[in-house]
Amino acid sequence: MFWFGAGVAAGVAISRKLGETARKATPTGMAEQLGGAMRELAGAVGSFGADVRAGMSEREQELQEVVEQADGRYARVDDDARRADRRARRAGR
């Protein structure tokens, strides 16, 4: 009785698997698979685009900080040069 039940269960499982495989081989099944693959690809492309935008924003912020630091250094150099010019003018009077 056990082996009979096991055989029936195996037959049902194999039958379902074959039916599912046959359905996937039909044009409708292939279209469903292609649609699912396209949705997955679109999600991956969207995710990649979001990662790229986040990276660009992060890099832009880093570059902005570098520019601000450089502007601060140049401003200090300009101030020092102006002070030196003023001193030279005063001394030359």
Image (cartoon, rainbow, N blue to C red):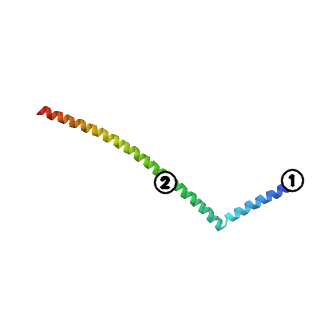
Instruction: Using a 10 Å C-alpha cutoff, classify the residue at mark 2 as few (fewer than 14 neighbours), some (14 to 19) or many (20 or more).
Output: few
Q: Quadrant of residue 3?
A: bottom right
Looking at the picture, which amino acid does disc 1 mark? Phe
| Foreground residue among 73 and 37 | 73
- Quarter of the figure that contains the C terminus: top left
Q: Residue 59 carries which label?
A: none
Q: Measured from the top left, where is residue 55 in percent x and y?
A: 46, 48
Give the image location of residue 64, x and y in percent: 37, 45
- Nearer the observer, 4 or 74: 74
Is 78 situated left or right of 64 in this image?
left
Q: Name the residue furthest right.
A: 1
> Which residue is under mark 2?
49
Q: Assign a secondary structure to mark 2.
A: helix
Above/below status of 82 relative to 45:
above
Q: Which residue lies furthest to the bottom in this view?
A: 27
Image position of 85 (left or right of 31): left
Residue linked to disc 1: 2
Distance of label 1 from label 2 (alpha carbons)? 57 Å
Q: What element carries label 1?
A: helix
Q: Horizontal and vertical percent for residue 49?
A: 49, 54
State whether residue 18 is above or below residue 75. below
Question: Residue drawn 25% across and 39% down?
Answer: 78
Kind of residue at badge 2: Gly
